[in-house]
Amino acid sequence: MCTYLTEKVSISGSAKGPAGWIRVTDASGYFDHPVHAQAEHTLNIDFLDPSAGPSARVAVELTAESARALAKAIQSTLDSAPPGLIT
Amino acid sequence: MYDAMLAETVTITGYNGDEIEAYSARTLRDGPVGGVVVIHHLPGYDRQTKEFTRRFAAGGLNAVMPNLYHREAPGADPDDAMAAARAGGSIPVPDERIVGDVAGAAAYLRGLSNSNGKVGVIGHCSGGRQSFLAAVSLPLDAAVDCYGGFVVGPPPEGHPLHGSPPLVERAGDLSCPLLGLFGAEDQHPSPEHVAELEAALKAHGKTYEFHSYEAASHAFLQVDRPSYRPEAAVDAWQHIWAWFGRYLLSSFDRRGVVSCALT
């Protein structure tokens, strides 16, 4: 099924795509049909700079298991950063 | 067997008089032939649904697929357009906009020089829902719903469609015969949803034909997805051709077109 559900968040950072590095200001996360990954539904993340048009996008499509593992790894990495580095 | 066609990007007039992109695939038969509006799934105006569209033209019908995300991202790659529509809050696309775009696509087909004036609609996944939506909203000649979710039953709390009345409540407005193709292992729509839709159509005396395939789930027609089920898909395509042949063509034309499509 198409879930339609989309979570959006404002972000600050950069991402690299075929055209090189872009500034990213927005991210969308959704669990829906992928375009490329060979699974029926995947956790998809779009890193976006809407001010630069629809093609200013770096996209990933991850199986649910991979996405959970990645989320855990991101959280763990942030939690273990030396004190004072995260402001 | 005559299978020549012309496939190209065109501009049609959709909802609110907006000019939107569409993918047109037209048989080069003199006609008269019927036309099919193809509604893409939520991932967008993609290569796979363009292949669907060309298949109708190769079989002897005219077909056109409106790009439902054109307004959000004109000229963008289909997946970028989908992402832009999501980020901009345009998904789900409002029902009235979809109906307007399908109406524009139907007008485009009726205006072709080889048209017999008849138009059907088909969609897969979310497009299956939109196919039913179009068929209860517009005067059409045939409709095909390929495993469209959220036709029956209220979408859950927090879902973007939550709060809108289920489309099944409009079954009495169905303007044309409906072919439904479903996977028995699908949960959206589930076999219970399919049974409820069938009961509503029966109660209103509508013409319909449903096929549910064992060992098939959602998106069993998608040839490059893990959900593809060739046995179900081959049978489903035979039903699609028979349906559009019956309702979009004269009996004389039907013999030539449908036999061409299935050989």
Image (tube, rainbow, N blue to C red):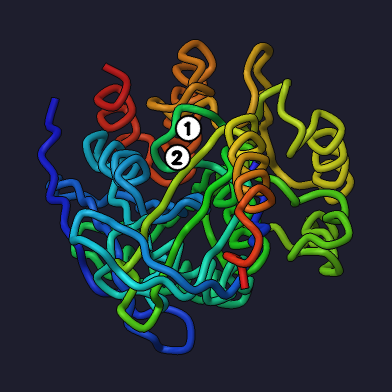
The residue that appears at 34% across and 33% down in the rendered structure is B254
User: Residue at coordinates 53% horizontally, 43% vertically from top-left?
Assistant: B124
Chain to which mark 1 belongs: B
Q: CA distance from mark 2 to mark 1?
A: 6 Å
**Residue corresponding to mark 2:** B244
Instruction: State how many labels appear.
Output: 2
Number of the label disc, if any, that sits on residue B61: none
Q: Nearer the viewer, mark 2 or mark 1?
A: 1
Q: Is residue B146 visible?
A: no
Q: Position of residue A69 (x, y in %)?
A: 63, 34
Q: Quadrant of the N terminus of chain A?
A: top right
Which amino acid does the dot numbered 1 rest on?
A: Ile
Is residue A71 shown above or below B195?
below
Q: Are marks 2 and 1 in contact (CB under 8 Å)?
A: yes
Q: Residue at x 37, y 44 (%)?
A: B49
Q: Who is closer to the viewer here, A35 or B229?
A: A35
Mark 2 chain: B
Label at residue B240: 1
Q: Is residue A57 above or below residue B39?
A: below
Label 2 SS = helix
